[in-house]
Amino acid sequence: MGERRWDVMLDRQQVIQLPVQDPVPALERVIALHSARDVLGRDVTVVDMRDGRRPVLRLSVPAVDELYRLRAIADGEDET
């Protein structure tokens, strides 16, 4: 309402952050992303749609740890 923006809280403790202006198209984009790439079925904690140019995804801590581990392996570092 007014200049406030709304967050949509999902049952998997995920949050969709919507912009103040035109929140419905932003939510529709999240639904389209989920349909195409199963975004909400992954280890994503926040889908930030406040920047109309692109969504920003925040991963869970275990997902970030795994990403760093895989990057280290790809860079030839010891995987321990």
Image (cartoon, grey):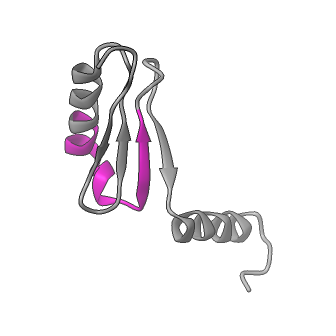
Residue toward you, 77 or 68: 68
Q: Residue at x 74, y 86 (%)?
A: 80
The magenta region covers 32-48
Residue 12's place in the image compared with 62, above or below, is above
Query: Farthest residue toward the right?
Result: 77
Left or right of 64 on screen, residue 7: left
Residue 39 sits inside the magenta stretch: yes
Residue toward you, 69 or 42: 42
Left or right of 77 on screen, residue 43: left
Residue 42's place in the image compared with 22, above or below, is below
Question: Which quadrant of the figure has residue 30?
Answer: top left
Query: Which quadrant does the N terminus fall into?
Result: top left
Residue toward you, 3 or 16: 3
Spot occupied by residue 69 in the image (x, y as percentages of width and height): 66, 71
Left or right of 78 on screen, residue 11: left
Spot occupied by residue 72 in the image (x, y as percentages of width and height): 73, 68
Q: Residue at x 72, y 81 (%)?
A: 79
Residue 3's place in the image compared with 31, above or below, is above
Q: Residue at x 51, y 49 (%)?
A: 58
Query: Farthest residue toward the bottom?
Result: 80
Tally the marks: 0
Spot occupied by residue 41 in the image (x, y as percentages of width and height): 28, 59
Q: Residue at x 22, y 34 (%)?
A: 32
Spot occupied by residue 54 in the image (x, y as percentages of width and height): 46, 25
Residue 28 sits inside the magenta stretch: no
